[in-house]
């Protein structure tokens, strides 16, 4: 069975108060309990807390656990401190008093604290002085850095201006060259066009010559085509008298042959 020490509500409406009860962890808040080990009233000022320290420590020895609220109450009343001393083997404060160990007087503690405070004051002053020195040194370093930064900025600005002047001088020096290059580039298309035109001119001339020669060739071809016809015509005309003469001879022969036949008859 897991045992816990937790609060159990009692009291009137709008005026709650609680008992510290040792209960089984499985039981509800107002259920069965094993033992009451304290009382807590949060409505009073200051709060009322009554604890049975011996019984609480006995239950803690047996392994009982406590809730968060009960733990804060036990811590306020010093029960947990006593329980820690018992667990670690240290002597509780009551046993030390019973054994005759005296508590240090307040006067002695004050006397001890005064030189410590003086020492602390001296150390505090020394720390303040060192801090002031460090702050001044930091300021000086910062000022030196700012001055160096300004000098570097001024030098950088001078370098930039020098570079700008150099670039301007280079640009001015390149000006005539660029103008000549631009003129050359503008002339280049004209020269190319002229070269193309000159290259095309012989072609056009040869084409014109061909076109001029073409009619002559055509007339020559026509003449050559007509020449055989004329030759055949001339041949025919030359043959025609011969054929006529042959026909006349045949006619005459036929006539002579007829006359001969008639003479024979």
Image: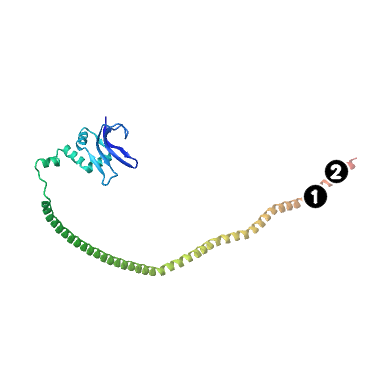
Which residue position is annotated with label 1?
244
* 262 in relation to 195, above or below: above
Judged from the image, the secondary structure of the residue bearing numbered disc 2 is: helix
Query: Which residue is most to the front?
Result: 12
Q: Residues within 10 Å of mark 2 (few under 14, many from 20)?
A: few
> Which of the two discs, 1 and 2, sits closer to the camera?
1
Give percent across and percent down for residue 105.
11, 49
Q: Are marks 1 and 2 in contact (CB under 8 Å)?
A: no
Q: How is the image coloured?
A: rainbow
The CA span between labels 1 and 2 is: 20 Å
Q: Residues within 10 Å of mark 1 (few under 14, many from 20)?
A: few
Based on the displayed image, in which of its 4 quarters is residue 145 positioned?
Answer: bottom left
Give percent across and percent down for residue 262.
90, 42
Give percent across and percent down for residue 54.
19, 36
If you read the primary sequence from the N terminus, does the residue marked by circle 1 or circle 2 appear first? 1
Query: Which residue is most to the top?
Result: 1
Depth order, front residue of 186/149: 149
* Residue positioned 78% across, 49% down in the render: 243
* 3 in relation to 239, above or below: above
Q: Is residue 77 left or right of residue 251?
A: left
Give percent across and percent down for residue 146.
27, 65
Which residue position is annotated with label 2?
257
Judged from the image, the secondary structure of the residue bearing numbered disc 1 is: helix
Q: Is residue 36 left or right of residue 235?
A: left
* Residue positioned 18% across, 40% down in the render: 82
Depth order, front residue of 85/195: 85
């Amino acid at each position: 069975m897991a045992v816990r020490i937790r609060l159990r509500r009692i009291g009137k409406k709008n005026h709650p108060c609680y008992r510290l009860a040792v209960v089984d962890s499985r039981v509800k808040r107002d259920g069965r309990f094993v033992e009451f080990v304290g009382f807590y009233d949060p409505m009073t000022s200051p709060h009322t807390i009554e604890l049975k320290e011996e019984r609480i420590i006995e239950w803690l020895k047996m392994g009982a656990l406590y809730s968060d609220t009960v733990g804060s109450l036990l811590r306020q009343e010093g029960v947990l401190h006593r329980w820690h001393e018992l667990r670690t083997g240290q002597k509780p404060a009551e046993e030390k008093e019973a054994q005759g160990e005296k508590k240090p007087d307040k006067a002695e503690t004050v006397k001890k604290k005064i030189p410590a405070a003086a020492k602390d004051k001296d150390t505090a002053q020394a720390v303040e002085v060192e801090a002031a020195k460090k702050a001044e040194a930091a300021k000086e370093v910062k000022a030196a850095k700012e001055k160096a930064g300004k000098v570097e900025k001024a030098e950088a600005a001078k370098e930039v201006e020098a570079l700008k002047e150099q670039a301007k001088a280079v640009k001015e020096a390149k000006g005539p060259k660029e103008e000549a290059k631009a003129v050359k580039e503008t002339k280049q298309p004209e020269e190319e066009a002229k070269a193309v035109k000159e290259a095309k001119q012989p072609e056009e001339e040869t084409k014109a010559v061909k076109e001029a020669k073409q009619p002559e060739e055509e007339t020559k071809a026509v003449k050559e085509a007509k020449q055989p016809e004329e030759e055949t015509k001339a041949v025919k005309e030359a043959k025609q008298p011969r054929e006529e003469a042959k026909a006349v001879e045949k006619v005459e022969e036929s006539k002579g042959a007829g006359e001969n036949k008639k003479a024979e008859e």
